[in-house]
Image (cartoon, rainbow, N blue to C red):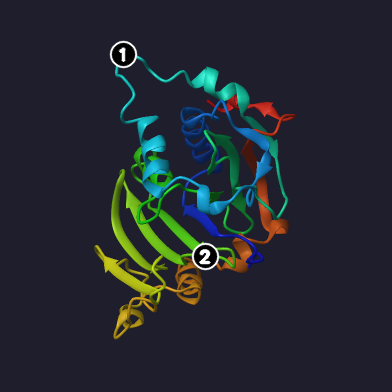
Amino acid sequence: MQHEDYAYLDFIVVEAPQIDVLRVMAAYRAEMGVPEDADPTEFAGGGDPDKRPSVLGLMWWALKQRIFSPKDEPIDFESNAQDLFLHADEAAGLDRRITWSQDGQVFGLPVETRISGIAGREDWTLVEFSDVISGMSMTATRLSEELPEEDVFFFRRSGSKAKEPHFDFHHYRAGEQRRRVMSHCTHPTDGSPAWWEGHAEGPMLPFEDPAAYEGKDGAEILTAARQSDLLKRLDLPEDLIFDPQLRIDAVLISDKPGGAPLSVAL
């Protein structure tokens, strides 16, 4: 498994050709674009996290790119894609956020997405990224909308930098979240003890172990160990999918210059 020096690790596994997944992710990233005030030299950890906008603020920014755009003003994918590039990438690390300042506040949004094949499981594709909200994944929703016949499995894992640990496992199909298992910890600001909420909602998948949820409280419904077990049951052990030596044709969508223009994948 990758080191835990991160806040949240978001990833998707889907049984679909890598080129199909790349095209969907390229269009999605072009749709989001790169904010005009963004400083691409400042990555994860920059700025004061206590001054970053709320989750609702980030969600509003992401949703309005697509849902609330005027219908007579279609998103200019080609223009938005000009500041994004495709890179061949086998590195273990992934820059998950850019930060920029506006009116004294520090903002952070997802910037890089890596799409790679998996050695020995060439029928599957791994997508590594960072979503802006929890409880649902707009990235997984979009992918399942564009690949409606495929099962899209989303995972969020918390690392050592997470102030509020979140563990998620979702199943999406045809643009719908059909299964959600999660354990989320909230750290109140008034000094009272942290509390956990946990849910296992929607139809259980055939490979899940029903006994794994019996008698579990909010903190135990989903853990890193449970996520590892779910991946094993998909025949995708994390040692396989996260070994950079076992990635196939890894492609990075990034604002770092020097690669091919993102438009070639649109």
Q: Is residue 84 left or right of residue 209?
A: right
Label 2 vs label 1: CA separation? 40 Å
Q: Which mark is residue 158?
A: 2
Q: Is residue 112 left or right of residue 194?
A: right
Q: Quadrant of residue 160?
A: bottom right
| Dot 1 crowding, Cα within 10 Å, few <14, some 14–19, many 20+ | few
- Percent coordinates x, y for residue 153 in the rendering: 42, 56
| Dot 2 crowding, Cα within 10 Å, few <14, some 14–19, many 20+ | many
Q: Is residue 165 left or right of residue 81?
A: left
- Percent coordinates x, y for residue 4 in the rendering: 63, 66
Determine whether label 2 and label 1 are within 8 Å by CB: no
- Percent coordinates x, y for residue 16 in the rendering: 47, 46
Q: Nearer the viewer, residue 147 or 27?
A: 27
Mark 2 or mark 1: name the one nearer the start of the chain.
1
Q: Is residue 124 visible?
A: no
Q: Which mark is residue 72?
A: 1
* SS assignment at label 1: loop
State the residue at coordinates (59%, 41%).
99
> Of the residues shown, which amino acid type is indicated by label 1?
Asp
* SS assignment at label 2: strand
> Of the residues shown, which amino acid type is indicated by label 2?
Ser
Vertical side of 112 occupied by 32: above or below: above
Q: Nearer the viewer, residue 27 or 108?
A: 108
Q: Is residue 111 left or right of residue 249?
A: left
State the residue at coordinates (39%, 55%).
134
* Numbered marks: total: 2
Q: Nearer the viewer, residue 187 or 266?
A: 187
- Percent coordinates x, y for residue 185 in the rendering: 40, 69
